[in-house]
Image (cartoon, rainbow, N blue to C red):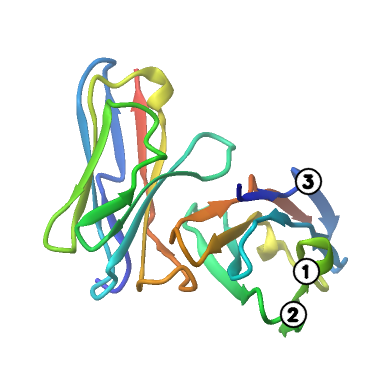
């Protein structure tokens, strides 16, 4: 597809379970970003990839959160032992390298932890 | 430290009125980039404009205009003759040349009433 895609679009899980969220960036975009948007809130930066490496992991809220990217393309964000406060929309964006480039956002994954 | 402030949480205007959304930023960098994104009710963020720190020219695109003033660290966004389709949350964002990380403001929710 032409845009950033994310799957699943919705995920409902029980507290304590692990979840995996997937992001497919736009082809050719080597930079990839994960954000979290809680209900009615702004965007909270989680992690940034340049290629397969993540030079800045400072935004991950806890050690239950991890992310990886392989082949410079698809990225997965994993949340272990989910908590209710993890409920949010998780947004992925991609761009060409360089902070001057605009980011293209996916539709997000709405995560609900019961 | 980098920071973006959007003091207006919510704004309501009547259709055809002009409206200005404020954005104030903080950064120690001399080279940085400012962005505006729109998040309509559908949820997907859409890029509107990018401005680099060396270009203080104001920009106009149709009914949209942006006023960048380094002296006051502001990058305000004006919608002229607002329309119902302009109803959305608008985010101002800042990135610098080092981190390739984009800091988003908390957003301003604009409602245009017919």
Residue tagged by mark 1?
Answer: B70
Q: Where in the figure is residue A16, as x and y percent of width and height?
A: 24, 15
The answer to whether the residues at label 3 and label 2 have Cβ atoms under 8 Å apart is no
Work out which quarter of the rendered image holds the C terminus of chain A and state it: top left
Above/below status of B80 relative to B55: above
Residue tagged by mark 3?
Answer: B7
Position of residue A21 in the picture relative to residue A97 (left or right): left
Marks 3/1: CA–CA distance: 18 Å
Q: Where in the figure is residue A107, as x and y percent of width and height?
A: 38, 54
Q: Which residue is drawn at 25% across and 36% down?
A: A66
Q: Which mark is residue B56?
A: 2
Q: Residue at x 13, y 56 (%)?
A: A70
* Few, some or many residues within 10 Å of mark 2 (<14, 14–19, 20+): some
Q: Which residue is drawn at 77% across and 69% down?
A: B70
Answer with mark 2 or mark 1, whichever residue precedes in sequence. Answer: 2
- Mark 3 or 2, which is nearer the eye? 2
Q: Where in the figure is residue A8, as x and y percent of width and height?
A: 25, 44
Tell me which chain the residue with mark 1 is part of: B
- Regarding mark 2 in the picture, which secondary structure is present there? loop
The answer to whether the residues at label 2 and label 1 have Cβ atoms under 8 Å apart is yes
């Amino acid at each position: 597809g032409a845009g950033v895609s994310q799957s699943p679009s919705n995920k409902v899980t029980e507290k304590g379970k692990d979840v995996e969220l997937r992001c497919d960036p736009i082809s050719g975009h080597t930079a990839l970003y994960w954000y979290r948007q809680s209900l009615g809130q702004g965007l909270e930066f989680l992690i940034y990839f340049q290629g397969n490496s993540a030079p800045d992991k400072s935004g991950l809220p806890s050690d239950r959160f991890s992310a990886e990217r392989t082949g410079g393309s698809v990225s997965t964000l994993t949340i272990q032992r989910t908590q209710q406060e993890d409920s949010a929309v998780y947004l992925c964006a991609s761009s060409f390298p360089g902070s001057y480039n605009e980011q293209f956002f996916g539709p997000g994954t709405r995560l609900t932890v019961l | 430290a980098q920071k973006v402030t959007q003091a207006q949480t919510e704004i309501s205007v009547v259709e055809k009125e002009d409206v200005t959304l404020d954005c104030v930023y903080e950064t120690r960098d001399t080279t940085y980039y400012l962005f505006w994104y729109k998040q309509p009710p559908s949820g997907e963020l859409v890029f509107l404009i990018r401005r680099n720190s060396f270009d203080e020219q104001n920009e106009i695109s149709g009914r949209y205009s942006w006023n960048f003033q380094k002296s006051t660290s502001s990058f305000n966004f004006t919608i002229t003759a607002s329309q119902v389709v302009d109803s959305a949350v608008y985010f101002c964002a800042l990135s610098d040349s080092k981190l390739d990380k984009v800091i988003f403001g908390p957003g301003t929710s604009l409602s245009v009433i017919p």
